[in-house]
Each structure stands twice: as structure tokens, then as C-alpha cells.
Amino acid sequence: LIKRVVEDLPALYPFNEGAVDRMNQAVHGNPRQLLKLADHVIESAAKIRAVQVDEDFVESALSSFQGVQPGSAVPLH
């Protein structure tokens, strides 16, 4: 049963494509920082029991991420 549930999940779960794009923009394509940010976002999502992480959630989590200096994140729009 667990195997079937995992196999049915999207490849990016719990992130959607917009969330991944936003995280990549925020860290300017740096793979190490992307992994750190993704971990931070997942921890933040787990605290509130979020099922899906979108770009808006990433945006809110960026304010408490230590890997990106304040004001250095690329604006979403």
C-alpha cells in the first residue's frame, strides 16, 4: 500500500513546479543553496502540516532562510 501511494505522487512532491522555480531564482541557481533552501521550506511546511508547497509558501519561508541575505532574493514578478 505504501509503495503504491509513493509511486502515485508527483516527482516534485511536496513542491509544485512554481515553488521549485522560485527557490532556484532565490538562490541564483546555486545547487548547494537550493538544497538548503528546500530543506528549510520542507521544515517550515512540516511545522504547519502543509500538504503542498507552492511559490507563495516559498516566498514566505524566504524571510527566515539564513542562506540568502535579506534583499538578495530575486523578486517573483
Image: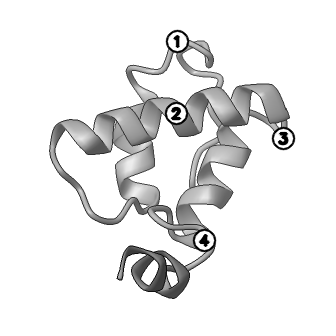
- The residue carrying mark 3 is 29
Q: How many angstroms separate mark 3 from mark 4 (CA)?
A: 15 Å
- The residue carrying mark 1 is 66
Q: How many angstroms separate mark 1 from mark 3 (CA)?
A: 16 Å
Q: Tell which residue pokes out farthest to the front in this image.
A: 1
- The residue carrying mark 2 is 39
- The residue carrying mark 4 is 17
Residue at figure coordinates x 38%, y 56% from the top left: 56
Amino acid type, label 2: Asp
User: Which element carries disc 4, helix, strand or loop?
Assistant: helix
Of labels 3 and 2, earlier in sequence is 3
Of labels 4 and 2, earlier in sequence is 4
Above-or-below relation of 1 to 58:
below
Q: Which quadrant of the rendered structure holds the N terminus?
A: bottom left
Amino acid type, label 1: Gln
- Quick one: label 1, few (<14), some, or many (20+) residues within 10 Å? few
**Labels 3, 2: front one:** 2
Residue at figure coordinates x 57%, y 21% from the top left: 71
> 44 or 9: which is nearer to us?
9
**Labels 4, 2: front one:** 2
In the image, taking residue 61 as reference, residue 22 lies left or right, namely: right
- Quick one: label 2, few (<14), some, or many (20+) residues within 10 Å? few
The answer to whether residue 77 shows anywhere in this view is no
Residue at figure coordinates x 66%, y 38% from the top left: 26
Amino acid type, label 3: Gly
Of labels 3 and 4, earlier in sequence is 4
